[in-house]
Amino acid sequence: MNLLVASAASFRSIRGALLSERTFATKKKPSTRPRSVAIPSTSNCLQQITLPNTWRGRRGLNDAKKFWAKGVKRLSGTEPPAGSLTDKPLLLYIDDRSTTTVTGFLWGQTNQIRFTKGHPLGQRLWSIAHPVPWSKKSRWIRWPTYIVVGFYSSLFLFWFFWRVRVPITGRWQFQCLPLQSPPPNGSHRQLNLSEEAAGRLLSRDDPRGARVREILARVLSASGLEHLAWTLLMFDAPNILNAAVAPEGVVMVFTGLLTVAETDDEIAAVLSHEVAHVLAQHAMANESGELLVYLATAPALPFAGAGLVIGELGMIAAPPLILGTVILLALTRKREAEADKIGMLLMTEAGFDPSAAVSFWDKMVQMEKSMKEKGAKQQAEFQSTHPHSQSRVEQAALDVPKILYMTGRGPLRPGQSSKELRRLEREKRLWEEFLRRRPFQAINSVDG
C-alpha cells in the first residue's frame, strides 16, 4: 500500500514538472519593440487626440486619412464616399491597449477612427498631440543639439563678419584670407616654369605677344591696377583655347586663343575678363569659400572614413559633401559671370567695343558644337566651374546696352521695369564711384 502511494506521488511530481517545463517553453516572450512615447492609462481606455496646426500635425493628419481610406477599402471592398473626410473633421482616438492593431472604425460616423496604444501610427499621432517639453528630453538629445547649433551659429557669424564688397558690382562675398595683389611696379618676380612650359614660351620679339601686350596695357590703364607689376606669358600651344591669370599679376595666354579671338576687341574681351578676376579678388574668395565649406562639412568626414569599412555609414556623409561641392561650383560660376560683366566695363572704358564679347562667345559656341559632332562630351552646367558658352552669349547680349548706358556711350534701352531701372542706376552709381577712386596712370607696356 505504501509502495502504491509513493508511486502515485512520484508520478504526480514528474507530470507537474513536465507540464511546468512545457508551459515555460510555450510562454510568449514579452515584446521588446521600443516605444517612442509612453501613453498613460485612463479609466475609460479611450482618449480623443487633437493634432496641432503645424507641419508635423498636418502631415500626421494626412497619414491618418490615408490609413482610414485604406481600411475602409479593405473592409468594405469599396472606396470611401466622396467628401466623407472633407465635410467633417477626422476624429482620432487612442485605445489604451498594447496590441498593434486598429480596434475598428465607427461606421455610424464615418469620420472617426480608433488606434490602439501599440499601433505605430497611433503612437506617432499621440507624440504629435502631446510633445515632450525640451527640458524633459534626454541629455543625450539636448547636449548634441547644443553643440551642433553652436558650431553652425559660429560658422554663420564667421561668414557674416568676414564679407567684403566687390568693386563695381557691390556684391557681398566671403573673404577671410588676406588680399593678394601683384607686387609694386619695378619689383623682381621669380617665375618657376617647367622645362616644357619654358620651351613653349614665345620670345618678347614675337609680333603676337607684342599685340596682346599692347591690348593688355590699355585694359590695365582702365582698371586702375596699372601701377602694379604685371607679366604676360605667351605660350605656343595652338590646340589650347584658353587664358588664365594668377593673383600675383601673371597673365597667361595660349596662342590657340588667337585663332578664335581674331580682332583686338575680342582679345580685349578675354584679357579684361582675366583682369576683372584680380580686381574682384576672386581667387581669394574661392579659397575662402573652400575653407568655409570644409569647416561646414567637417562633422561628416568621420562618417565618410567609416564608410570605407561600413558602407551604410558612408551614406550619412554623402549628402553634406555633395551639397558642399554643388555650392562651391555655383559660387564659382557666379564669379565667372561677374568677371564677364566687370570685364566688359573695363574694355569699354579702355576704348574697345563691348559687343565683341558677344561675337567671341558665339564663336566658342560654334566650336563646341563642332566638337560635339566629332564625339566630344560636355559636362552639365551645374557640374562645371564655368557657365556654358551659350549662357554667356545670351547674358553678354543683354549686358551690352546696359554697359553702353553705364559708361555714357549709349542711350537707355526702353521697355525696362522699375526694378530693373533701379538696379541699373545703382550699378551706374557704383561704376562712377569706382572711376573716381581708381588711381589712374597710363602705361605703355607690360613685362613679358
Image (tube, grey):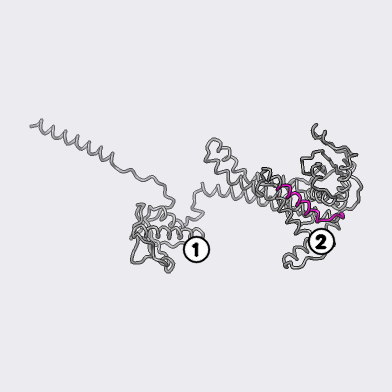
Dot 1 surroundings within 10 Å: few (below 14), some, or many (20 or more)?
few
Residue 355 belongs to the span the image colors magenta: yes
Give 268 or 72, whichever is nearer the viewer. 268
Give the x, y percent position of residue 224.
86, 52
Tell me, yes or no, if residue 201 can be seen here: yes
What amino acid is labelled 2 in the image?
Met
Region of the chain picked out in magenta, as a range: 350-369
- To which residue does mark 2 refer? 406
Instruction: Tell me the SS state at disc 2.
Output: helix
> Which residue lies most toward the bottom here?
87
Give the Cα distance between marks 1 and 2: 51 Å
Question: Residue at 75% of width from left, 63% of height from top?
Answer: 423
Tell me, yes or no, if residue 162 can be seen here: no
Describe residue 14's horizontal placement relative to residue 186 as left or right: left
Q: Which mark is residue 207?
A: none
Give the x, y percent position of residue 78.
36, 61
Give the x, y percent position of residue 178.
77, 45
Q: Which mark is residue 53?
A: 1
Residue 195 belongs to the span the image colors magenta: no
Q: Quadrant of the C terminus?
A: top right
Give the x, y percent position of residue 21.
25, 37
Q: Quadrant of the N terminus?
A: top left
Describe residue 315's horizontal placement relative to residue 119 as left or right: right
Question: Residue at 89% of width from left, 47% of height from top?
Answer: 214
Give 429 or 379, whichever is nearer the viewer. 379
Quarter-wise, where is residue 22 in the image? Answer: top left
What amino acid is labelled 1 in the image?
Asn
> Which residue lies most toward the left here?
1
Chain-order first, disc 1 or disc 2: 1
Describe residue 151's horizontal placement relative to residue 60 as left or right: right
Question: Residue at 77% of width from left, 40% of height from top?
Answer: 239
Magenta stretch, overall SS: helix
